[in-house]
Image: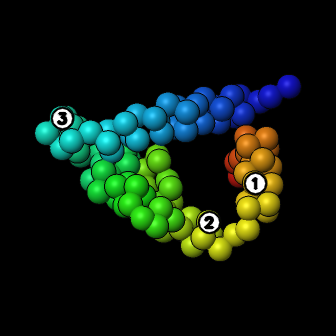
Amino acid sequence: TRSPLALSIIILKWLCCAYGTQLGHYWSHMPPQKRPAVVRFLQRAHIFLPAKEHASHHRPPYDKNFGIVSGLSNGLLNGVLKGMPAKPLIALWAFLTVFDVALVERLFASFA
């Protein structure tokens, strides 16, 4: 069985990753005049993906700024993704996709 902590992590993952990424990504493609003030504020704070930062991902050589949540991870991920061969990258993605909730749950439970 899962703990209440695991349930909280799963809900946050759904909100921040599943829905949050699409919303932030959507607004990063909207012209500035169509973005409400609250969205522009959230983009400046990197809570939503800033349009200018994401736009560089759509220009040659198409090799940077893949973060679609807030862009805060781009600094770290740009270097990792450019230098990592595909097989280990896919293996890491698969591992984290399957075990991320359990890993985070154990990490936070250790602080309790």
Residue type, label 2: Leu
Q: Is residue 8 above or below residue 100?
A: above
Could you tell me residue 86's position as x and y percent?
A: 73, 62
> Looking at the image, which residue is at 80% across and 49% down?
95
Judging by the rendered image, the residue that carries numbered circle 1 is: 90
Q: Residues within 10 Å of mark 1 (few under 14, many from 20)?
A: few
Q: What residue did someone put label 2 on?
A: 81
Distance from label 3 to label 1 (Cα)?
Answer: 37 Å
Mark 2 surroundings: few (<14), some (14-19) or many (≥20) residues within 10 A: some
Q: Quadrant of residue 37?
A: top left
Secondary structure beneath label 3: helix
Q: Is residue 103 visible?
A: no
Amino acid type, residue under disc 3 in the picture: Lys
Residue in the image at 47% along x and 48% along y? 68
Closest to the observer, 96 or 5: 96
Residue at the image point whose x is 70% and y is 69% from the top: 84
**Residue type at the position of mark 1:** Ile
Say whether residue 50 is left or right of residue 36: right
CA separation in Å, label 2 and label 3: 32 Å
- Label drawn at residue 34: 3
Q: Earlier in the sequence, mark 1 or mark 2?
A: 2
Q: Is residue 82 left or right of residue 38?
A: right
Of callouts 2 and 3, the N-terminal one: 3
